[in-house]
Amino acid sequence: MNTDALNHTARRMVTRRLSRRTALTASAAGLGATMLGRAGRTPVALAQAATPAATRDNLPPEVPAWMQTPGAPSSPYGERAAAEDSIVRLAPNPVISFSPLAELPGTLTPNALFYEIHFGGIPAIDPSAHRLLVHGLVERPTLFTVDDIKRFPAVSVIHFLECAGNSFSEWTEASMSPTVQLSHGWTSSAEWTGVPLATILRDVGIQPGGGWLLAEGADAAGLNRSIPTAKAMADGLLVYAANGEALRPSQGYPLRLLLPGFEGNMNIKWLRRLKVGHEPWHTRWDTPYYGDLLPDGTAREFTFVMEAKSVITSPSGGHHLAGPGFQEITGLAWSGRGRISQVDVSTDGGQSWSPATLQEPVLPMAWTRFRLPWSWDGQATQLQSRAIDETGYVQPTIAQLVEARGVNSFYHNNAIKTWAIAADGEVRNVYA
Ligand code: CO
């Protein structure tokens, strides 16, 4: 048998084996043969048929170039594969960047892809010169070094962050963003390591009536917010690490506040001061900036909690379905009030709903990934997801949200998102 014939046989074997495995996975998911494309071929089989000659040279029994010589040496700090370099944050201006939600496969955001919002740039802080002052209505006003903070018993917890303004573009049809990165990319998720605020506050001793904290960042904006002491005592953290390494400068290095479930800006980065007081301070960030303007001219203020929300990240705006057949629908759900208890997915524009599978572990105030196997019949349709949290709160439609709050409010848009699929497979954002 010559080499060409050998190659041909090996290719056929690989194709057959992969096809069978894909079909088995399909029936295990309860989908049977209907999920296979019109021609009854799996996506894997289609990919095999389309394999260019240069790639075939790398398939068994050939020995690919990267097996013929030793690879690169190890390095002190890792790099991702060059072919993945196109997955980046989008930063339309120097103040903000959006995380690429459609390209994140799991429930954590790599630190390098975390969304950012900063009003005075990213400060270059010398950690040995950084201090945290805790003062006001306390028994023992204290100036902590970063090393002092790190001496306290620590915990690691997984929580999402979300800017209060995430999905601001989705309030009106005219302002909608084309992709999930721009419409929902002001949320990210990490495993955070730090010291419970309760430990620090007990260490300094809060005086009676110290019901509020003023938290201040060490950036050029001096962003500060009034925070209920009860929240800080319940689950607040002083954080110095994310996803297994020190916070990045843009994440608040060397020390930040984490208030699980509260809007992003309150999780003060570059934390330098906590002042205990009787009442909120009504700083410019508390009232005009992060207030929610209602149609009658009044504003909601101190709207801290990010309510339950979900979004389908794949397929989503800007994607193009290759053709009819199997398509996993997947996305993220989260709630600032606890665990996600259910995510329903509609593949017919909200006429009917199916419960998606929630990927374990389902943690409180953390991204929860949902998945639903689906076979697209090639007809134009609309996809939606609807989150329900453990309090029974149901994610609203945009019509319900606008009915309650009008469209003046930049903040707290947690409405159901609709992605329309055209008959040609084009996926786009629609107002529905
Ligand atoms: Co708010």
Image: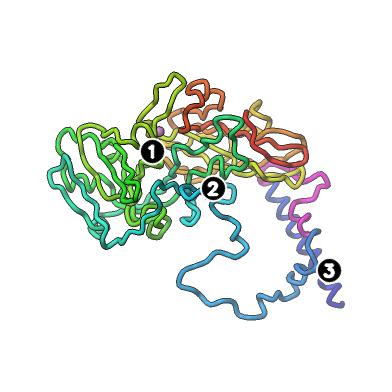
SS of the residue under disc 3: helix
- Where disc 1 sits, the SS reads loop
| Residue placed furthest toward the left | 139
Q: CA distance from mark 2 to mark 1?
A: 25 Å
Q: Is residue 390 magenta?
A: no
Label whose residue precedes the other's in the sequence (2 or 1):
2
* Mark 1 Cβ inside 8 Å of ligand 1: no
Circle on res. 92: 2
Residue located 30% across and 61% down the image? 127
- Mark 3 = which residue? 8
Amino acid type shown at disc 1: Phe
Q: Earlier in the sequence, mark 3 or mark 1?
A: 3
Q: Which quadrant: the N terminus?
A: bottom right
Residue 326 vs residue 121, the one in the foreground = 121
Say which element carries label 2.
Answer: strand
Can you identify the residue that label 1 sits on? 262
Q: Is residue 37 magenta-colored?
A: yes
Figure quarter occupied by ligand 1: top left
Which callout, 2 or 3, points at the residue further toward the start of the chain? 3
Under mark 3, the amino acid is: His
Residue 344 on image: x %, y %:
58, 33
Instruction: Provide the residue span drawn in magenta.
Output: 28-48
